[in-house]
Image: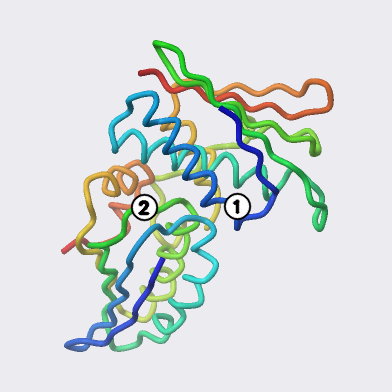
């Protein structure tokens, strides 16, 4: 599982590649730390190459969102495949995030 | 088919390989296979986190049996009696600020599996999850 953080057009982008299972969530949490310093930026999770996510991964996304909202940053998800969209819908996460 | 894991999160990828094999044998499509991976990971990780006292290494055995109508998974451990089916579901209608960070694991198991049952027999926790074909 690879996480890359980029800054582009004023947005902080986290690009996921692989399976975000409980084992991968440990190192991914560290990789997402730059997103906690998001004042003045929106955040985008690029999920085009995200093959799988379990509750540990969903928790990481929620953690970023809980930090971002009071700072006025919007959080977007892009490139979610249908299987992942089902998981997001089931857990109510489609109501928490913006999709583009 | 049987798999034995340690109560160590780093063993989770071994579970994925096993579940993929079982699902392929059962003829599940990729979407259902992903859902089985998710449900089993959530159930097994719960056992990894809670069954044995902190610092104690323990085994978790996963049995998978396929018949014409369904696939049955049994997760067996020798830890403290723990019934995950007694845990409350997460409230998925809460806003981001209100959502607690935990509670999704057993919720996903319930959503994705057709039957869940638990028993404590002969000193072992046994959690049985069934997916109908």
Give the crowd class for mark 2: few <14, some 14-19, many >=20 residues within 10 Å: many
Q: Quadrant of residue A39?
A: bottom left
- Residue tagged 2: A52
Q: Secondary structure at mark 1?
A: helix
Residue reaching furthest top? B68
In this view, A51 is above or below B84: below
Instruction: Look at 39% across and 80% down and name the residue there.
Output: A35
Badge 2: chain ID:
A
Question: Foreground residue, B67 or A58?
Answer: B67
The image quadrant where one finds the C terminus of chain A is bottom left
Q: Position of residue B35 (x, y in %)?
A: 38, 38
- Relative to residue B45, is residue B24 depicted above or below? above
Residue appearing at x 47%, y 70% in the figure = A28
For mark 2, give the secondary structure.
strand
Task: Give the label on residue B104, or none.
Answer: none
When asked about the image quadrant of residue A11, the answer is bottom left
Task: Tell me whether marks 2 and 1 sit on the same chain.
Answer: no
Labelled pair 2, 1 in contact (Cβ < 8 Å): no
Q: Which residue is mark 1?
A: B11
Residue at (42% x, 57% y) in the render: A58
Give how far across and how far down residue B5 sits, in percent.
66, 44
Q: Residue at x 60, y 21 (%)?
A: B117
Residue B82 pos. (x, y %): 73, 35
**Counting other residues with Cα less than 10 Å from the Cα at mark 1, is it few (<14), some (14-19), or many (20 or more)?**
some
């Amino acid at each position: 599982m690879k996480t890359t953080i980029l800054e582009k057009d004023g947005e902080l982008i986290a690009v996921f590649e692989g399976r975000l299972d409980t084992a991968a969530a440990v190192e991914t949490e560290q990789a997402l730390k730059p997103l906690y310093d998001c004042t003045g930026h929106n955040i985008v999770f690029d999920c085009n190459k995200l093959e799988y996510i379990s509750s540990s991964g969903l928790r990481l996304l929620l953690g970023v969102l809980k930090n971002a909202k009071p700072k006025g940053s919007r959080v977007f998800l892009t490139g979610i495949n249908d299987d992942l969209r089902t998981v997001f819908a089931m857990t109510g996460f489609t109501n928490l995030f913006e999709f583009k | 088919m049987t798999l034995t894991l340690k109560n160590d999160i780093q063993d989770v990828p071994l579970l994925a390989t096993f579940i993929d094999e079982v699902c392929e044998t059962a003829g599940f499509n990729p979407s259902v296979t992903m859902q089985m991976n998710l449900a089993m990971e959530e159930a097994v990780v719960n056992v990894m986190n809670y069954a044995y006292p902190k610092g104690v290494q323990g085994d978790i055995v996963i049995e998978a049996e396929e018949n014409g109508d369904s696939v049955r998974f049994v997760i067996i451990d020798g830890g403290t009696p723990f019934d995950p089916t007694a845990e409350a579901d997460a409230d998925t209608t809460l806003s981001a600020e209100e959502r607690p960070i935990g509670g999704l694991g057993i919720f996903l198991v319930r959503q994705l599996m057709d039957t869940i049952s638990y028993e404590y027999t002969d000193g072992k926790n046994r959690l049985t999850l069934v997916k109908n074909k």
